[in-house]
């Protein structure tokens, strides 16, 4: 008899798995295909607890589907461009690739040891020229469609990282990477025109409902921020210029009593009279110092300056004083608003701060906003609004738009919060933008046959330190090229792409990772995509997931893919925390994964993690017991050993244990049936609890029942090994081998469930009224409390004894007892 030796089992199976390449998909059409994908890791160092959790979850799905008979694609790669590599290179006077690829080696070794069921032959790195060649190629396809363009505008600037940021990378006004408050800078930058896809990104979320977490869909919906309303044009008195506003409430036009433009917009400087220019400029200086969050905070006292101008209400002809204020944002709508203080709280606060009039145009029955200080935003009857009087809000909005359109001073419009995706970065470690700037020809795409535009390899350490312009700009022999069009002297674009560009299409590269003709083989895409189950953190709810959806739609429009959504289902795993708090250096509550693996073994750590909570919830390491899991695994493993010892022929029981212990057989089949349902519903933690029960039941059968030679015991232990293989692959394969199988458990079939064994026995439930037995009911042994309560109340005998009395309480002890207490 051996004992359960974790280290020995790991070193025995790992090389065997590597050699067997168990998770290379057949891709021959003999089985239905399924694509399972984990968000690929950033090679920041070694594998950590967060990876361990996320990948354990994805692995359950991949292994389960394979056992169920699907041809499973479960690849892995590295999101290996990005700032941390560059910062590490500066510190160590090295090239970013050194740090990056060393980390990848370390992480890959840990992933292998961690036993993730992936096809290693498809491994990719976004920083490899073979990969970024295609990132550049795709950029050029977008460029040719007018979906990649350059413009000069105020952009988010991180003063610490010395690079621009996409709106999606600014979290509460700060850089999502380093937390530094983001400022604005006017720069000429590259954008992807994601705004062209706003409506499709919204509409195509409909079929994702129920398959994606609702909060992710809600976050995307808010980020896109579609609002319906109207553009209304206002003449400016004494100026030839017209100014347009965006309003969701054109019905309230007659209630506009002043007009506000964003203080930091060009418009403010254009409109201001000479007399007020100094005031405006002083105010603009103050506004510059505020962050975006401060500007939008509703509690903050309203500030602003009068510009000396008047806008003319196109409906009533009233002159509205024009103000500049910071509560109106330069980059939303048109950067100008018609202020309706009676019905908009921000406008009302401003009106009260500066003594501007308040005019009610919707009679809501609430107190006059001028007195209460509370704007009335609800429905009511229109008043003081000419031909709109008497209409409800729902009627008045289209009616007002009709009036404006007839008078040619406005039209219906849809406004979005979504902005184009700023994709250029002034840093080194990313895919160079494949554009050449020629004095004569302008922007010239690098010809496809000259891709990739490789990064120079002679930059290291200080060469990479952030200067506000790309480090590539300093490499003269890289920057200076001849124009592909006219052969004259020209300059390469020196910016690199946001790393979110790399990750917006990697899932497509995985289906044909070695393709040299195209970024992906369209036929392989048709076979494998969309991803059937995507697994990753909720922190990507907007950035990566929105960008990937956008890429897919563009590729669809390019005729390169046949589906418009990349991820049919999404699972957001929780985080691993410790003592109720996120692990952090400053709290000193970090848990080192490799130390845990060394102490308890891979399987124990994996199973402890999955068992701790439903996959969507956080795992608090303080409540997790890998030691307990290790004990459980040893118990399961000993079952296989006992069966092997008891079997005289040591062979596999082919008849499925038909002859054996009936109660154990029922338990086994019920466990397998329930496990399948639970796995489909992603209740992985409950599956583990079920396996634990089955292990206990089997142990009892061996020690004080049927004995280890009973065919039902073998059947039970085989089921345990197969179920365990989803969570504890080393232990499972070792059990499988002891049971006499000469192949890996990953190649086993999901156990067949004998439906006749699932019929549950019934029990007799006693029904009392006021403590006296009044009926007996035959009910299923697993009857729910609610069902039993209903059955009891429906009993004729009970109704007779209740005799129409009201019921005070019903005490239910399923499945055996119900006590009804009348009032
Ligand atoms: C008049 C009005 C009356 C408005 C009323 C609202 C209520 P959402 O729903 O977020 O799209 N607005 C327009 N552009 C703005 C800007 N650049 N900065 C700040 N506010 C701006 O909001 C649209 C409403 O926000 C618009 O409708 C406009 O005020 C304001 F009873 O116009 B409304
Ligand atoms: Zn040229």
Image: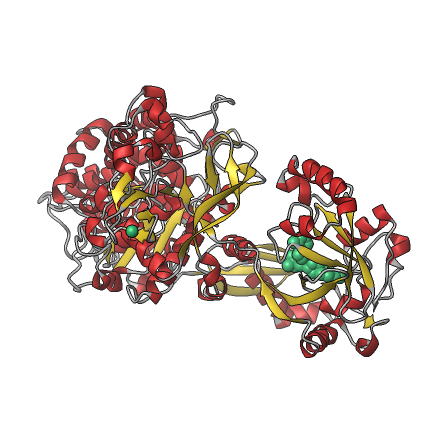
Q: Is residue 235 left or right of residue 66?
A: right
Is 175 left or right of 73, judged from the image as shown? Answer: right
Q: Position of residue 540 (x, y in %)?
A: 45, 46
Return the residue found at the far right. Answer: 371
Q: Is residue 668 visible to the viewer in this orientation of the structure?
A: no
In the drawing, does residue 551 fall left or right of residue 736? right
Residue 358 position in % (x across, y down)? 86, 58
User: Left or right of 15: which side holds 609?
Assistant: right
Residue 599 drawn above or below residue 279: above
Q: How is the image coloured?
A: secondary structure
Q: Quadrant of the N terminus?
A: top left
Total labels drawn: 0
In the image, what residue occupies the spot 15% across and 52% down? 653
What is the quadrant of residue 757 in the picture?
bottom left
Q: Quadrant of residue 32?
A: bottom left
- Give the percent coordinates (x, y) of residue 601: 29, 30
Q: Nearer the viewer, residue 458 or 115?
A: 458
Give the camera-side residue of 322 and 395: 322
Quadrant of the image for the C terminus? bottom right
For residue 459, above or below residue 422 = above
Q: In this orientation, which residue lies closer to the viewer: 262 or 673?
A: 262
> Is residue 298 something one can see in this rendering?
yes
Which of the pair 677/37 is nearer the observer?
37
Q: Which residue is painted at 38% across and 35% down in the image?
A: 470
Where residue 685 appears, as percent x and y from the top left, is 41, 45
Question: In the rendered image, which quarter is residue 300 located in?
Answer: top right
């Amino acid at each position: 008899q051996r004992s359960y030796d974790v280290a020995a089992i790991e070193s025995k199976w790992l090389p065997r798995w590597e050699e067997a390449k168990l998770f290379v998909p057949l891709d021959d059409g003999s089985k239905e295909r399924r694509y399972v994908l984990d968000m690929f890791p950033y090679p920041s160092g070694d594998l950590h607890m967060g990876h361990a959790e996320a990948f354990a979850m994805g692995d359950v799905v991949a292994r389960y589907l394979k056992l169920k008979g699907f041809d499973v694609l479960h690849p892995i790669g590295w999101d290996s461009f990005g700032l941390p590599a560059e910062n590490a290179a500066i510190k160590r006077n090295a090239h970013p690739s050194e740090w990056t690829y060393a980390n990848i080696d370390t992480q890959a070794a840990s992933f292998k040891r961690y036993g993730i069921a992936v096809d290693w032959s498809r491994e990719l790195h976004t920083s490899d020229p073979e990969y970024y060649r295609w990132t550049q190629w795709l950029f050029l396809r977008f460029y040719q469609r007018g979906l990649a363009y350059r413009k000069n505008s105020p952009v988010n600037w991180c003063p610490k990282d010395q690079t621009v940021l996409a709106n999606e990378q600014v979290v509460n006004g700060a850089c999502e990477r380093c937390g530094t408050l983001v400022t604005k800078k006017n720069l000429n930058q590259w954008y992807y025109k994601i705004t062209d896809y706003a409506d499709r990104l919204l509409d195509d979320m409909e079929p994702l409902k129920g398959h994606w977490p609702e909060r992710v869909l809600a976050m995307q919906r808010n980020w896109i921020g579609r609002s319906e309303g109207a553009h209304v044009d206002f003449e400016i008195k004494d100026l030839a210029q017209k100014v347009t506003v965006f309003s969701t409430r054109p019905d309230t036009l007659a209630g506009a009593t002043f007009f506000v433009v964003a203080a930091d917009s060009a418009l403010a400087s254009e409109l201001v009279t000479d007399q007020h220019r100094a005031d405006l400029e002083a105010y603009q200086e103050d506004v510059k110092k505020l962050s975006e969050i401060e500007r939008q905070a509703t509690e903050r006292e309203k500030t602003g300056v009068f510009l000396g101008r008047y806008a003319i209400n196109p409906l009533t002809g009233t002159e509205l004083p024009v103000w500049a204020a910071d509560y109106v944002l330069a980059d939303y709508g048109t950067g100008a608003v018609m202020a309706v203080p009676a019905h908009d709280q921000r406008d009302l606060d401003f009106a009260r701060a500066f003594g501007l009039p308040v005019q009610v145009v919707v009679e809501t029955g609430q107190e006059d906003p001028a007195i209460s200080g509370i704007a009335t935003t609800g429905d009511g009857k229109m008043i003081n609004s000419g031909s709109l009087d008497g209409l409800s809000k729902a009627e008045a909005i289209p009616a007002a738009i009709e009036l404006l359109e007839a008078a040619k001073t406005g039209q219906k419009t849809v406004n979005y919060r979504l902005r184009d995706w700023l994709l250029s970065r002034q840093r080194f470690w990313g895919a160079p933008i494949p554009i050449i700037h020629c004095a004569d020809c302008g922007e010239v795409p690098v010809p496809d046959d000259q891709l990739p535009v490789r990064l120079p390899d002679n930059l290291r350490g200080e060469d990479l330190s952030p200067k506000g312009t790309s480090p590539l700009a300093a490499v003269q022999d890289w920057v200076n090229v001849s124009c592909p069009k006219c052969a004259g002297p020209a300059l390469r674009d020196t910016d690199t792409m946001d790393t979110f560009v790399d990750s917006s299409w990697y899932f497509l590269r995985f289906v044909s990772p070695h393709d040299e003709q195209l970024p992906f083989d369209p036929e392989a895409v048709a076979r494998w995509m969309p991803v059937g189950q995507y697994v990753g953190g909720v922190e990507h709810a907007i950035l990566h997931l929105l960008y990937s959806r956008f890429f897919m739609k563009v590729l669809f429009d390019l005729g390169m893919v046949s589906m418009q959504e990349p991820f049919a289902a999404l699972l957001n795993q929780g985080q691993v925390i410790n003592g109720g708090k996120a692990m952090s250096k400053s709290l000193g509550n970090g848990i080192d994964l490799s130390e845990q693996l060394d102490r308890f073994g891979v399987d124990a750590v994996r199973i402890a993690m999955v068992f701790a909570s439903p996959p969507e919830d956080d795992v608090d390491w303080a409540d997790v017991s890998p030691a307990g899991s290790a004990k459980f695994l040893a118990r399961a493993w000993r079952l296989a050993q006992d069966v092997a010892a008891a079997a005289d022929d040591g062979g596999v029981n082919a008849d499925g244990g038909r002859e054996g212990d009936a109660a154990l057989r029922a338990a086994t089949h019920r466990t397998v049936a329930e496990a399948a349902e639970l796995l489909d519903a992603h209740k992985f933690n409950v599956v583990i609890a079920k396996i634990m029960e089955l292990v206990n039941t089997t142990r009892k059968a061996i020690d004080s029942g049927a004995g280890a030679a009973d065919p039902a015991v073998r059947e039970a232990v085989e089921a345990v090994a197969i179920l365990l293989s989803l969570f504890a692959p080393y232990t499972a394969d070792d059990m499988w081998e002891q049971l006499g199988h000469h192949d890996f458990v990953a190649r086993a079939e999901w156990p067949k469930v004998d439906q006749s064994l699932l019929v549950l026995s019934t029990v007799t439930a006693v029904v009392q009224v006021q403590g006296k037995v009044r009926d007996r009911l035959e009910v299923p042994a697993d009857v729910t409390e609610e069902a039993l309560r209903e059955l009891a109340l429906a009993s004729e005998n009970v109704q007779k004894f209740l005799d129409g009395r009201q019921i005070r309480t019903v005490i239910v002890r399923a499945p055996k007892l119900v006590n009804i207490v009348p009032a």
